[in-house]
Amino acid sequence: MDLEYSKKLLRILIHNSSQILNAGFGVDRAESSFFDVIDLLREVPHLREDFLLMVKDTLKNRDPSGLDEGSVPRELVELAAHELRWQEFRALANERVKSIFGGDVALARSDIAHTIAEAYQESWEGRQFYRRYNEHE
């Protein structure tokens, strides 16, 4: 697959995920789009840097709900951290705690920086929202 085409496809899939959530539908409706992104990232390893840059830009926002144009939905970031287990997600979460919360982890308790770290665990609470996990358990 051509790298430029793959980059464009990645942005389209992320945008589709955001549109589903913006329309008021939940993770159950966006799940397929989320896993399309995950599958593409696995299929085209060269997209890793692009995706992480998009996540980094999203996490710079005070409220990184990820529903603005060009942002990555919070739920997709958490799912990607869970599925891919890239250490860069932890680094980005730590960077967010430092820049937004002055390094105080307690203040970030309900923030995406905290939930990214939780997503690395097999027992991640977010698994309950995805049919894919519930069908296999």
Image (cartoon, rainbow, N blue to C red):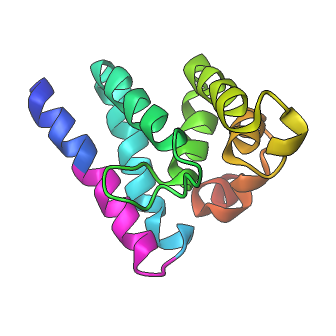
Identify the residue at the far bottom of this view.
Answer: 24
Q: Which quarter of the rendered picture does the N terminus lie within?
A: top left
Identify the residue at the far right of this view.
Answer: 106
Which residue is at a point 39% across and 28% down the rendered structure image? 53
Magenta residues (range): 12-25
Please say whether residue 68 is one of the residues in the magenta stretch: no
| Front residue of this view, candidates 6 and 122 | 6
Q: Is 105 situated left or right of 59 in this image?
A: right
Task: Evaluate whether residue 1 shows in this view.
Answer: no
Secondary structure mostly taken by the magenta-highlighted segment of the chain = helix
In the depicted structure, whether residue 75 falls above or below residue 47? below
Where residue 129 sits, quadrant-wise, is bottom right
Residue 98 on image: x %, y %: 71, 27
Q: Is 100 situated left or right of 32 in this image?
A: right
Residue 31 on image: x %, y %: 48, 61
Q: Is 3 situated left or right of 54 in this image?
A: left
Which residue is at a point 34% across and 69% down the rendered structure image? 19
Which residue is at a point 73% across and 44% down the rendered structure image? 115
| Picture mark count | 0
Please say whether residue 16 is one of the residues in the magenta stretch: yes
Which residue is at a point 32% across and 27% down the rendered structure image? 50
| Front residue of this view, candidates 116 and 71 | 71
| Front residue of this view, candidates 38 and 70 | 70
